[in-house]
Structure formats: structure tokens, C-alpha cells
Image (cartoon, coloured by chain):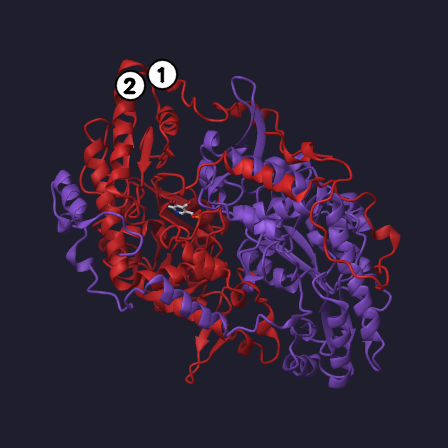
Amino acid sequence: MRVIFDKSVPGRIGVRPSRQTGCPPPHIEPKLLREQPAALPELSEMDVVRHFTGLSRRNFGLDLGFYPLGSCTMKYNPKLNERVAALPGFAELHPLLPQLPTGERLVQGALAVLHDMDRLLSEICGMAAFTLQPLAGAHGELTGVMMIAAYHKERGNRKTTLLIPDSAHGTNPASAAIAGYEVRAIPSDADGRMDVAALKDALDASVAGLMMTNPNTLGLFEPRVREIADLVHSVDGLMYYDGANLNPLLGRCRPGDMGFDLVHINLHKTFSTPHGGGGPGAGPVGVSAKLVDFLPVSLVKERPDGSFFLDYDCPKSIGYIAPFYGNFGIVLRAYAYLLSLGKEGLLRVSEHATLNANYLKERLKPFYDLPKPGVCKHECVFSAKRQVVHGVHALDLAKALIDRGFHPPTVYFPITIPEAIMIEPTETESKETLDAFIEAMIEIAKLAETNPEEIVSCPKTTVVGRLDETRAARQPDLASLD
Amino acid sequence: MPYIANTPEQQTEMLRAIGTDLEGLFADIPSALRCAGLKVASGLPEQDVRRRMAVVADRNRADLVGFLGGGFYDHFVPAAVSAIVSRSEFATSYTPYQPEISQGVLQAIYEYQSAICRLTGMEVSNASLYDGGTALYEAIMMALRVTGRRRVVVDDSVSPIYRTMVRTYTRNLGIELVETSSRIGLADREALARVINDQTAAVAVQNPNFFGCLDDFSDVAELAHRHGALLIASAYPVSLGIVKTPGAMGADLVVGEGQSLGMPLSFGGPYLGFMAARKEHVRKMPGRIAGRTVDAQGRQGFVLTLQAREQHIRREKATSNICTNQGLCALTALVFMSLLGKQGFRELALSCAEKASYAAQRLQAIPEVRMRFGKRWFFNEFVLELPVAADRVIRRLLEKGFAAGFPLGRYYPHMEKSLLVAVTEKRTKEEIDLFAHTLEVSL
Ligand SMILES: Cc1ncc(COP(=O)(O)O)c(C=O)c1O
């Protein structure tokens, strides 16, 4: 499809803004004005609608079919939540209103949602309090790591290092480094769990903490997590929980009870908010009692009379990390989801997320190499090792799945598993869908042996074939400029 | 149960295929780590959630006639924006890791990058950052990488909200953050000249600044460049419908808050951080970037590119930790800009500026009310100097249904009587007249 700028017809007008006659001209001297209007497309409203409808048809979304992208928890995004977020009382609310005199009275509904969400997430995670401000998971990580730094500073600790398993998501080491820490990687053991002996070796007085996720990125629960937490605490390190993998634990097992001091959760994963082609999400951070003072400004608090206020008096806080109260529209969606699920619903989520993943794992095990056997949680990680022998790689398998109508799993992550294929079905998928996917995977595995060329040349059903990524990077064409 | 598909019969069948029971699925979690049961209420049917949330929403005063801006503006959003953006092919997809089935999102990112470049007068843009404040922080970090220096100058006419964020993020990193004081509404050139030196990585300014005043930073860009520093300009995208671009002023990095491009105020988010730069710095940029390329048959297609900057490849050496961004907000901005188009977008900016001009005329006609920065040019926001504390006036106007503006004393202690008033195209002359009248009788 041509880019929208190439469809432009000089003089054509789309949506006209409201103008009023009788206003004086802008109070701007000519030399402060731009010489030419911005070269935006000149199209009718229908042209624009058709262009983007056309683009949408060239895009695979969860509402079109199975999207088992590991580590991303592509569960169904309930439509109710969109309606809730669009209520004018929320959508049209100016974030600076609470800063006006008597302003908090103007936003009691919004503050009630934030306060209740803080309580709900604290209960679900076993933490003392949450900030809802972080704008995505990685932003939550950075917020958490800055709180770790503040904690050590207050205690006069000189800590320079964060420990991170080698199987961790890339955002963990990136967040640690951006906050000024050195990263020390902890290897995995033969079972795919953290190598506790190696952890012991790596522990010294310079360790500020450990970032880990549980179940880990292989979908495996780390049963020695309490022991790990005790070890880290023994050097006055803090335990950071990457909550991207919280889904299979909902209602059953809480990060706080495992010994974690800080937790971020991805509302766009565990709590069903849409992923939006890359975002927006939200990454609230919860902390145990000893870290509450370091939470970002401001905090939503309740008065004895049941009204809510924003507390800006946080002398030990790390400061402001977001312009306001977080991605409020995302928090609202997640809140509506939690109201819908309730206690029982949370348990069913973890149950079916785990059931679906184990069902896939068991059915596919005869056909694909499963590096770490045993019960998994919400996702399972295969390797394309057996297919590589025939010249078929994880990426090729992914492309073959595309031709069969599925979004591929995550491939090449975690990096500790060569040729990784990471499948996360989520609880909202039915057995029929899983069966269809399993059949396709089995068919592909067989084809990889009998006719590997067929797979290496996939996809064939898409609007474009495999794209030249080397050319994209070597001769970057990053914008259509006027 | 809501949103669960498997029936009990299917569940039994699946457990049989696995060769375990429900308990067996969780046998790997030691019993000492199990939680006894959450103190969470029971779930509600859809209708009940809707009703309950409607009641909660009604406890917010979103109905006030708004003259409150401060970097976040109440603009009109055409119906076609949500019609397009809510299409689930866009909304329910994720980061386009598989380009063949993600051409819609990828091409949209490319078009968004193009629109941001055209708007700001720059050469490259990323696919989005979280918001205007984190975008400013990321720009500062990028300037440190480009220059290899540790000193940053930020003028205090840059949004105080963003400056507090930057302080948080740079605190422990050995970065020297120098804040200059603006004078009479504009960045003080002499103060800047005193602090910009050969250790300076970047100078950050904003146009229009937090007081709504318009400036031309060409001279500051020159000054910065003379010392080998970059100029970072934070911009209000709607103003760029008519206002001189940061690119034309010589800015090296342009960032800002994209909320005004079709996103509702939504009590602070989700919004859109945008970032544009000159081509030579693209490999130091944070965030996703889409590029145009071809497939084996020579067909045009789009991919995520220059990924060797990013966390999933470089881990602790990445340019940023950002992963999930504000994708759907970037799409919103693109659709908004495309619908208004070249002419409509200019008219939108004109409409804001004209109505603001009208409001300024009406308001400064009130006895004892004057323009605080009377000689300054402004786009759609300006500072009124009142004879009494701004808080008092705001409180009275709230009672009459107006959000009168922002009390600048919150951030600038010597400005207790200053009221920052924003006017968008959504305000009518009648509303402005009534606002002026109500303000006059409230003094
Ligand atoms: C395990 C893990 N940790 C952290 C993140 C980062 O979260 P986000 O993309 O919301 O920043 C992700 C997801 O992308 C993840 O899968």
C-alpha cells in the first residue's frame, strides 16, 4: 500500500476545525511563524478512513485469532473495559484539576479508583502499597530500581551491583544499567532454574538486590525462591519481582509471600488491557512496608471521612516519575477487569492459564525438543533443535504458522535456550483453538523432515514476504520527508 | 467464569491428556508459598460493572468549562479518530515482531514518524516514548551519549512538571543539572550564556514555554553548537500548525507531549511522548523505529529496524530500557493529523491562537487585570496578573462551573497572583465572554 503522503491531493480537505469570526488575529509576530504549513496529507475523511482500514487489514490482532506470544500474555481484551475508560467523567478529566484550590473534590471518583486499585493489587501481590504511576513494565522496573537505590542511600550502604538471571528479559538489565547499577548475570542450572550455588558465589556486600521473575522466563516456577530471598537479604540486598509472569499465580501465590520487596506488574498482560500494537500499557509497582516511604510522589490516600486526597508530603520519595497518576485510562480498564473477575475469577485465570500451557506442552512434546521437561506454569519453551538438523529454524517455524492462520509464539527468547519457541496460550483460549494450533505445529514438524524447503519459503499467504532487514538497517529509510 | 472458554468437560479431558489433576498443575509451588485465599470481593456481571463505574465517573467534575492547560489541552477529537483507532486489528495486536502480519502497524509507525518529522522540521523520529516528560529525560540521556559529556542546562520556563521528572531520573547518575531562571517570560539569554560551556551536553528549552510565551531559539541553538552542545526543544505539537519549527531554529532533538493530537485528557494518560532528531544521531536514539524496505520480490514493506540500540538485543548496553511504548497513541496522533491534513491542521492552530487572542483581549480589559508578560507573543496560553491571589479567583470560578486556569504560584513562588489561561478551539466566544464576565465579578 502506498504511504498516506503519496495519496495526498493538493487542495483536498478532510476534517475542518471550528473557527469563529470576529476574533482578533493571533498575537504572534510573523518571524515566529512557520513559513510553510506542515506537509501533512491532503485527503478527505473517507480517504483517510479507507487508508487506515486498509492498513488494519494488513495486521494480525488477537481478535482475529490465536496469539500465543510468550511473555506477553495476549489474553482476550474485554470490550466492557473500553466502554468504562471512555466514560466522559473519566476521559474528559483534566489531570491538573487536583492542583487547583479545593481541587481534589473535583476528582473524587478518579481518586477512588486509584486508591481501590492500590488496595486490590497490594492484596493480590502481598505488598504494602502500590504506585500506579509507572507507564509500562520497564518503566516500573526503573522506578523500582531507583527505590532500591534510595533505600540503600538512606541506610548508608554502598551498593553498586544488581544480580539478574541470564534468562531475564532484556528490560531488566537495561533498567538496572540506566539507573546506574552494574549488572552481574546469574546462570541457570540444568533444570532451567536459578543456579543457587552461583548466586551464593556472586553475593557480596556490593549487591544492591536481585531482579527475577517467577515463574521464570522458561515458564518454570522457582521453588527455592524463599531461600534465594534469604540469601539476598543476608547482604541487605532487595528482591525485585518482574511481574510479567504473574498470570499463573493469581490467587494462589503472592510475590510478597515469596520474599520479594518490590514488584511491578504489567496491566497490559496480566490484567487484560489491550496491547495497542506496542502500547500503551501500565507497570504499577508495589513495595513491602520497608520501602513505602520511597514511593514516587504523589500517593492517593483516604481520610477518615471516606474522601480521598493526594499526598505530596513524601520527604523520602524518589520524586516524580510520571507527569501525573500513571496511564489512568489503562488503570481503569484493569480495574473494570478486576471487578468482573473477583476472587473466584482470579483463581480461574491462573488455573486455565496453567492448564492450557501444560496441555500444549504435553501434546507437542513428542514433536519438538523440550529442553526443560516437567510441569510448567503459564508458558512453555521449546527449542527448534530437532528441526534445525533439517535446516529449519525457529524463525521458519514461525513463518509457517503465519500461513496457517496463527500468530507465532515468541522466538529466540529466552536467550538461554537456543532456537527458543516460547508459547503462552493464556487462559482465555479454548481447547478447540489449542487443538487446531497443535495440529498445525505437528504438521509443520513433519514437514520440516519431509520437505524443509516448503517451510523455509514461508510465509506465502501474506501481503509481503520476508523483508530485507539488512537493507533496512544499512540504507535506513525512516520517514517520508517533504 | 468471565472470559474463560474451557468447559469442565474439556478441562477434565485436558488434564487426562496431561496425565495429572488440577493439584498436579501447581505441585511445583511449595505449600509454604501458597496463599490461603485473597480478600477480594466476588466478581460482578458486566451490567453491574458498567453501572458501578458510571456512578464513580459521575463523582468527577469533567464538565467544567476548561481554561486549564499547562501542557495538557482539551482539544476536539473528530469521530473518525476513535472509529479507526478502536479497530481491533490495531488495538489487540502487540509490538510488530512478525512483519509479514504486522504491515498495518509498521506502516502506520513509518507514517507517524514521517508526520512527526514534517511537523517538527526534523529528519528522523522514533515510534513513541511514554510521555513528554520521559521524552525530555530520554533526550537528555541521548545528548549525553552523543557528546560524551555530563552537564545539562534546563531553562525554568520548561514545564516544571517535566523538570521535576528529569531531576528524579538524573539524581544518582553523576549528571550536573543546571537550571537557569527565565526572565520576563522568556529564557534569559545572558543566564544561558553564563552557564553553557564546553562541558555542556545539552540545553533544553520549550516552545511555547510553560508561560505560553513564544520564542525563537535560533540564537540559543547557535550558542549551544558553538560549545559542542545539543539543543533540545520541547514543543506543543498543535502550535506547530503555524509556529516556526524547532528544526528551523536549529534544534538537534525535538521532544514533546503528543496528547493534543487526538488523545483525551483522561486524568493524565495514556499520552504520547514523541522524539525527533537529526539523521546523524539516529543510532543513539531510544525506542522502536520502523523503516521501509523490500521483500525478495521487490515489494515495499516495513520492519522494525536499527534494533541493535534496543534492550532485547543489547540488554544493559541498550540506549534505553523502553519496550512497551505508546503505540496506539502514536496511531491516534497520525490519524488525527491525517484527518485534519495540511490545511485543517493549520486552521486548528489558527483557531486556537485567534480564540486565545480574543480571550486575552477580553480578560485584560477587566480593571486591575493585566497580561503578566504583556510584550510577549503567545500561541494559545497566557499569564494573567490578577489583583488578588489566583487561588481565590479559581475557587470562585469553580463554583460557577469554570476551570479558570492554573495558579502559577504552585511552581513559581513569586507568582501567587498569576493565572495561566489556556484557550483551545473547543471554547466558544460565548464561553469566553461569560468567563471574562464571571472573572470580573469574582474579583
Ligand atoms: C519478562 C518480561 N519482563 C519485562 C517486560 C517489560 O515490560 P514492558 O514491555 O511493559 O515494558 C516484559 C515484556 O515486554 C517481559 O516479558
Q: Label 2 neighbourhood size at 10 Å, few (<14), some (14-19), many (20+)?
A: some
- Chain seen in red: A
Marking on residue A454:
1
Q: Nearer the viewer, residue B179 or A32?
A: A32
Q: Quadrant of the image for the C terminus of chain A?
A: top right
Element type at mark 2: helix
Q: Nearer the viewer, residue A17 or B417?
A: A17
User: Mark 1 and 2 residues: CB-CB less than 8 Å, in contact?
Assistant: yes
**Residue A434: % across, % down:** 26, 38
What amino acid is found at the position of numbered circle 1 in the picture? Glu
Element type at mark 1: helix
Q: Which residue is mark 2?
A: A447
Check the image and report above or below for A398 versus A434: above
Name the residue at the front extreme. A46
Q: What distance separates the C-alpha of mark 1 from that of mark 2?
A: 8 Å
Label 1 lies in ligand 1 vicinity (Cβ under 8 Å): no
Chain B rendered in what hue?
Answer: purple
Q: Nearer the viewer, residue B285 or A166?
A: B285
Q: Is residue B424 visible?
A: yes
Q: Residue at x 41, y 57 (%)?
A: A80
Check the image and report above or below for A111 versus B352: below
Please report, as a chain letter, where disc 2 is located.
Answer: A
